[in-house]
Amino acid sequence: MKIGLMGGTFDPIHIGHLLAAQSVSEELGLDEVWFVPTNVPPHKAQSKGAAPHQRLEMVRLAIEGYDRFRATAIELEKGGVSYSIETVLLLRSEYPEHEFYYIIGADMVRYLPKWVRIGELAKLVTFVGLQRPGFDAGLDLLPPDIRASVRLASMPQIELSSTRIRERRAAGLPVRYMVPDQVNHYIEVNRLYEA
Ligand SMILES: Nc1ncnc2c1ncn2[C@@H]1O[C@H](COP(=O)(O)OP(=O)(O)OP(=O)(O)O)[C@@H](O)[C@H]1O
Ligand SMILES: O=C(O)c1ccc[n+]([C@@H]2O[C@H](COP(=O)([O-])O)[C@@H](O)[C@H]2O)c1
């Protein structure tokens, strides 16, 4: 099967992530998208957000009932910093029959050369960069071996980030409709991201 991997901190998961996964899935004819919450993200200052098990639970709630989307705890179970090469090697040994597509934001494409063991990873997956209108993904700046494994896909633009959601919560503002209802409920019940 063709499997999209949607890695992220998901603190919390929001409709931008879901629409990205759905759009790439349609455009590339993926059979499934697996959401992979990071344990410790490699290139990000850690936010004082939700606990890892809460981030995973919110992903599960967001995709519940849609069997083409799945959540995997592979990076949380492994612990430590979540380098994608290690995740992909584990997944390939467990599922040698699948073909993996790693979905990333347009802004991430130009940073691919900084990813750990990127030369190796680029041979194991096809990266799918989500294009943004008026934003150059920087394909021309990539070394040819990495560039060869990158495809671009498009999606309706959603100007939304988890940071914005956390900031709104801290300011006492609602985040309804920015996240699925079940996630909104979970955030409220657990009083996540309050100041
Ligand atoms: N609004 C969006 N539209 C398309 N892709 C997105 C959007 N927000 C995040 N992504 C992509 O989803 C993946 C996971 O993102 P992540 O969990 O870091 O969310 P984020 O909203 O960027 O979080 P934060 O604001 O905490 O940095 C990344 O590849 C990121 O580029
Ligand atoms: O493996 C790496 O070196 C690496 C560097 C940067 C990002 N990633 C992965 O890319 C995904 C999106 O990253 P982020 O920081 O936008 O949440 C997430 O799953 C990260 O683990 C991976």
Image (cartoon, helix red, strand yellow):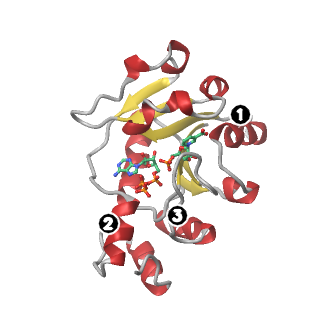
Q: Label 1 is placed on what type of residue?
A: Glu
**Residue 168 location, x and y as percent?**
31, 72
> Is the residue marked 3 within 8 Å of ligand 1, measured from its CB?
no
Q: Residue furthest left?
A: 134
Q: Nearer the viewer, residue 49 or 23?
A: 49
Identify residue for label 1: 97
Q: Label 2 is placed on what type of residue?
A: Met
Q: Residue at x 26, y 46 (%)?
A: 156
**Residue 82 location, x and y as percent?**
65, 48
Q: Eyeballing the image, is 97 above or below 34?
A: above
Q: Residue at x 67, y 38 (%)?
A: 88
Number of marks in the rendered image: 3
Crowding at mark 3 (Cα within 10 Å: few <14, some 14-19, many 20+):
many
Secondary structure at numbered mark 2: loop
**Residue 178 location, x and y as percent?**
32, 66
Q: Residue at x 28, y 52 (%)?
A: 158
Q: Left of 183 or right of it: where is 38?
A: right
Q: Residue furthest right?
A: 93
Of the two numbered discs 1 and 3 in the rendering, the one whose residue sits closer to the viewer: 3
Secondary structure at numbered mark 1: loop
Identify residue for label 3: 59
Crowding at mark 2 (Cα within 10 Å: few <14, some 14-19, many 20+):
some
Q: Nearer the viewer, residue 103 or 110?
A: 110
Q: Quadrant of residue 152?
A: top left
**Residue 29 location, x and y as percent?**
46, 35
Q: Residue at x 29, y 78 (%)?
A: 174
Secondary structure at numbered mark 3: helix
Q: Earlier in the sequence, mark 1 or mark 3?
A: 3
Identify residue for label 2: 178
Crowding at mark 1 (Cα within 10 Å: few <14, some 14-19, many 20+):
few
